[in-house]
Amino acid sequence: MPALVLLGAQWGDEGKGKATDLLGGSVDYVVRYQGGNNAGHTVVVGDQKYALHLLPSGILSPECTPVIGNGVVIDPAVLLSELSGLNERGVDTSKLLVSGNAHLITPYHTTLDKVTERFLGKRKIGTTGRGIGPTYADKINRVGIRVQDLFDESILTQKVEAALDFKNQVMAKLYNRRAIVTEQVVEELLGYADQLRGFVADTTLILNDAVDEGKVVLFEGGQGTLLDVDHGTYPFVTSSNPTAGGACTGAGIGPTKINRVIGILKAYTTRVGAGPFPTELFDADGEALRTIGGERGVTTGRDRRCGWFDAVIARYATRVNGLTDFFLTKLDVLTGWEQIPVCVAYEIDGERVTELPYSQTDFHHAKPVYEYLPGWSEDITKAKTFADLPKNAQGYVRALEEMSGAPISAIGVGPGRDETIQINSFI
């Protein structure tokens, strides 16, 4: 039985929640391995819509054990609020497991995130202001607070004190803000200890045992490939590794145990926040994609930037993740266009380039080279098999598959859980 990684193959917001939820009834564990509540997944079950931020999408499948791995950064207030909201809607959240090694977002992390973005002005990254970056920075600087620290007041106090020694200097001298009081932070964090204690476990041991026992474990990335801190459009990226390698470090499982890596591709391209975006549209087509696709960030509430499908970044995602399959989402949004442009290459300084340029400067100057595929006008939301799709829709899917470098094994033709065409089984 397989261990699978499921991740975004663009800039995030590809529909990972729908894909994870589709597999949720077939897997034993669903694991978030990176990111924090800067990620958002929307899952539609029947007439119910669920917006998830920290929790793995598998939380909605009763047969599945949801896990928050050590690579995630957790705002305890957000986690408890999200759990409470689901409980009120009748969702059983009691099976959730949280790694004791995951790092905590504290009040001073969110404060620093917001004031730093304001200080950067025009150079701002476009963060969500939720403290994600500063928390990962503290983790790397070895002054972070982990979930397990909530259960030892002495250690917690020492760690908060050490972190604030430097941060209060920055707050006062650079940002003209009042110092943050150690005792207040400690008191707030200790208030979460009893509420979280029952969820905390050695998740690395549990997950490795599960794979060894032949159970199906699905590792779920929070953001997309092009937002990876190492392999994305740096510096306009997140602070962690949503690419497939991040599943190993963020969940504590060896790479030889992973059987398949599934990339989620939207049938067009979107992006939230600042940074280069070669196929971005500023015309009526862009507005139509935004409106028809409901392109508004689940977490940020910001309108997403919209553009045509970019096969260059799809090929890049295949390469850096070792993708074995694609799940193509939101094909139904493209219904009604007579012709659909697809970016097959870039033009940079008069030269045609078919692979993602490694140079940040070159990527900023990349202009899309389009091929035009025939569109369709038929409603596809009721399609149950690939053969049910109009010929031009079939042709569009096959063209994207050939350009992207991995087979498309499932297609989303609507937002609902049952509005999916399965071509090849993932398990």
Image (cartoon, rainbow, N blue to C red):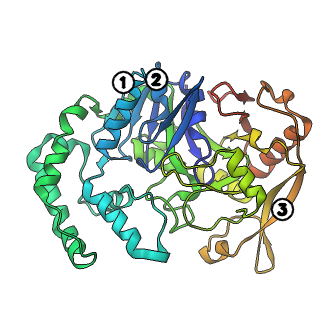
**Residues tagged 3 and 1 counted as in contact (Cβ below 8 A):** no
The circle drawn on residue 76 is none
Left or right: residue 421 compared with residue 341: left
Secondary structure under badge 2? loop
Residue marked by disc 1: 95
Disc 3 and disc 2: Cα gap in Å? 43 Å
Q: Say whether marks 2 and 1 touch (CB < 8 Å).
A: yes
Q: Residues within 10 Å of mark 1 (few under 14, many from 20)?
A: some
Q: Considering only order in the chain, which callout, 1 or 2, is on the residue closer to the N terminus?
A: 2
The kind of residue on which mark 2 rests is: Cys
Q: Circle 2 is placed at which residue position? A: 64
Q: Amino acid at mark 1?
A: Lys
State the residue in front, 201 or 371: 371
- Give residue 109's quadrant in the image: bottom left
Q: How many marks?
A: 3
Mark 3: give few (<14), some (14-19) or many (20+) Cα within 10 Å. Answer: some
Instruction: Say which element carries label 1.
Output: loop
- Judging by the rendered image, the residue that carries numbered circle 3 is 370
Q: Residues within 10 Å of mark 2 (few under 14, many from 20)?
A: many
Residue drawn at x 70%, y 33% is: 414
Mark before the other along the chain sequence, 3 or 2 = 2
